[in-house]
Image: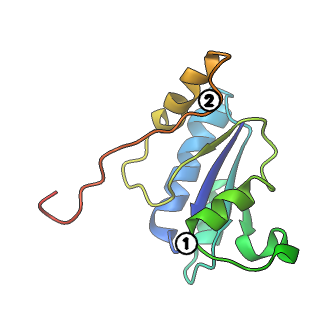
């Protein structure tokens, strides 16, 4: 299984997320095989932080360059499909400050039902100081 993180300018958070997945879900439980970060043109040290924490890091522009360049989260998501080696892919955001391994395992549990082929999680993301 691959955990894929689309990222742009997420140096402040991506390393901690990758480190948690590596520690808890790769080394700990053994349910994840790799963490892939698709860096979509970051101007900060997102790629270095992710790689130092144990992720496979690719630049979005380097994946299938023959199809043309594009930017944005959607671009990074579909390009992750061409880089990740897992049979199952879990996508998580790279900017979460309260990341928990259950964000990954919670998406996996419904897949135990053979009729389930897609699972999408959700969470509240308060906007501004007032929520």
Q: Residue furthest right?
A: 66
Q: Residues within 10 Å of mark 1 (few under 14, many from 20)?
A: many
Mark 2 highlights which residue? 28
Q: Nearer the viewer, mark 1 or mark 2?
A: 1
At 72% from the left edge and 35% from the top edge, which residue is drawn? 88
Q: Secondary structure at mark 2?
A: helix
Residue 22 in the figure: left or right of residue 68: left
Residue 85 in the figure: left or right of residue 100: right
Foreground of the two, 95 or 11: 95
Please tell me in which quadrant of the rendered image residue 95 appears. bottom left
Q: Residues within 10 Å of mark 2 (few under 14, many from 20)?
A: few
Foreground of the two, 5 or 12: 5
Foreground of the two, 29 or 5: 5
Residue 68: x percent and y percent? 79, 79
Of the 4 image quadrants, the one containing the N terminus is top right
At 60% from the left edge and 63% from the top edge, which residue is drawn? 74
Residue 8, labelled with which disc?
1
At 24% from the left edge and 56% from the top edge, which residue is drawn? 126
Q: Secondary structure at mark 1?
A: loop
Please tell me in which quadrant of the rendered image residue 58 appears. bottom right
At 78% from the left edge and 39% from the top edge, which residue is drawn? 86
Residue 129 visible in the current orientation: yes
């Amino acid at each position: 299984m691959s955990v894929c993180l689309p990222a742009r300018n997420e140096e402040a958070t991506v390393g901690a997320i990758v480190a948690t997945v590596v520690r808890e879900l790769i080394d700990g439980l053994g349910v994840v095989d790799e963490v892939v970060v698709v860096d979509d043109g970051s101007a900060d040290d997102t790629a270095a932080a992710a790689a130092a924490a144990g992720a496979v890091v690719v630049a979005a522009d380097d994946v299938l360059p023959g199809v043309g360049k594009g930017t944005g989260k959607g671009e990074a998501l579909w390009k992750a499909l061409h880089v990740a080696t897992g049979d199952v892919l879990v996508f998580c955001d790279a900017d979460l400050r309260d990341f928990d391994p259950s964000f990954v395992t919670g998406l996996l549990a419904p897949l135990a039902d053979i009729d389930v082929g897609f699972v999408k999680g959700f969470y509240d993301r308060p906007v501004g100081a007032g929520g």
